[in-house]
Image (cartoon, rainbow, N blue to C red):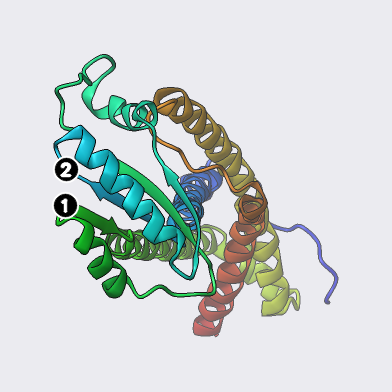
């Protein structure tokens, strides 16, 4: 007796399994948000590191305008002759004002404000500069010449990104564990409710595998249905928040772009939900039936 047929009655009045698709929808919703957050942080970190790697920022904080301009020319000459430096760009007063406006406000940058001169330096990707030697050469021009290679900031940001990715992974693991526990509870509740039907099936010669297959199919449908609902709600939330953040952050900060290719991974969540429900129900039923023998 190996053919499959539906012998379990409808469970519309059974709270443990009737609400299971909605519980799985919540689990998939949380998983999608955690996974999306991890992908956005990782994508944003890659964009920021690419924009800052192989670049240096040189600041000249001499207060007198004439001496500052002379120092800028001398620094640019030294950098242009330095092996590994591919481009030296002196930021204009307008460009510096644009960088400061988000922090100081439009119209608050006056002539009496001590704004340093800044140079944006690009270097070759395969060649590492001796920054200590370069600093020494530039210090000979003026003590008020500073080099920022952004490495200290990137190191702190890398630690933050790593921690956030571990938090997202922890959330995913907790969600999976909670989903497994919920399916186990629902399966045991279903077995307890239908124990008389199961006894009759055993008397008719049904094997444990046939009974487990019926629960496996039912819980797989619950998991798939809940996964689809949760994914739809998650996608609506994600794109709604992305649209809102882009509108609020326009002109202030560069927001990370949504990695659409990587986010295709979210489409697998309903199938993962169905697989977890199916496998958990199968194992639970077989273990419970083995104890009753």
> Can you give x and y, in whole percent of width and height, for residue 207 in the image?
72, 79
On the question of residue 33 being in view, the answer is: yes
- The reply to whether callout 2 and callout 1 are in contact (CB within 8 Å) is yes
Dot 2: element: loop
Residue at 56 percent across and 32 percent down: it is 236
> Can you give x and y, in whole percent of width and height, for residue 221 in the image?
67, 53
Left or right: 180 in relation to 138: right
Quadrant for residue 80, please give it: bottom left
Q: Does residue 126 sit above or below 219 in this rendering?
A: below
Residue at 70 percent across and 77 percent down: it is 209
> Can you give x and y, in whole percent of width and height, for residue 255 in the image?
46, 38
Residue at 14 percent across and 37 percent down: it is 63
Q: For label 1, count other residues whose C-alpha is less than 10 Å away and answer few (under 14), some (14-19) or many (20+).
A: some
On the question of residue 175 being in view, the answer is: no
Q: Decide which of 156, 262 is in the foreground and name it.
A: 156
Left or right: 104 in relation to 204: left
Q: Decide which of 291, 176 is in the foreground and name it.
A: 176
Residue found at the very far top of the displayed protein = 107
Q: Does residue 106 sit above or below 57 in this rendering?
A: above
Check the picture and name the quadrant holding the C terminus: bottom right
Residue at 75 percent across and 78 percent down: it is 205
Which label's residue is closer to the chain start, 2 or 1?
A: 2
Tag shown at residue 213: none
Left or right: 236 in relation to 143: right
Left or right: 262 in relation to 161: right
Q: Which residue is the site of mark 2?
A: 62
Check the picture and name the quadrant holding the N terminus: bottom right
Q: Decide which of 271, 119 is in the foreground and name it.
A: 119
Dot 1: element: loop
Tag shown at residue 144: 1
> Can you give x and y, in whole percent of width and height, for residue 224 in the image?
65, 51
């Amino acid at each position: 007796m190996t053919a499959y047929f539906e012998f379990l009655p409808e469970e519309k009045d059974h709270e443990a399994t009737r609400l299971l698709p909605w519980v799985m929808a919540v689990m998939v919703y949380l998983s999608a948000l955690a996974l999306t957050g991890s992908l956005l942080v990782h994508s944003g970190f890659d964009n920021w590191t690419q924009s800052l790697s192989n670049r240096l920022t040189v600041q000249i904080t001499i207060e007198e305008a004439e001496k500052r301009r002379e120092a800028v020319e001398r620094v640019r000459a030294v950098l242009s002759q330095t092996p590994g430096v591919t481009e030296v760009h002196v930021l204009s007063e307008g460009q510096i004002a644009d960088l400061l406006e988000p922090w100081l406000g439009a119209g608050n940058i006056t002539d009496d404000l001590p704004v340093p001169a800044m140079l944006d330096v690009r270097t070759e990707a395969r060649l590492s500069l001796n920054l200590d030697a370069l600093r020494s050469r530039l210090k000979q021009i003026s003590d008020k010449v500073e080099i920022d290679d952004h490495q200290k900031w990137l190191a702190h940001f890398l630690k933050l990104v790593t921690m956030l990715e571990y938090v997202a992974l922890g959330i995913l693991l907790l969600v999976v564990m909670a989903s497994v526990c919920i399916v186990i509870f629902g399966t045991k509740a279903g077995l307890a409710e239908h124990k008389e039907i199961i006894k009759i099936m055993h008397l008719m010669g049904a094997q444990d595998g046939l009974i487990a297959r019926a629960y496996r199919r039912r819980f797989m449908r619950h998991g798939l249905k809940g996964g689809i609902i949760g994914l739809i709600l998650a996608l609506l939330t994600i794109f709604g928040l992305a649209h809102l953040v882009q509108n609020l952050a326009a002109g202030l900060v560069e927001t990370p772009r949504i990695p659409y290719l990587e986010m295709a991974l979210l489409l697998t969540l309903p199938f993962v939900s169905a697989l977890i429900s199916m496998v958990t129900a199968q194992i639970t039923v077989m273990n419970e039936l083995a104890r009753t023998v």
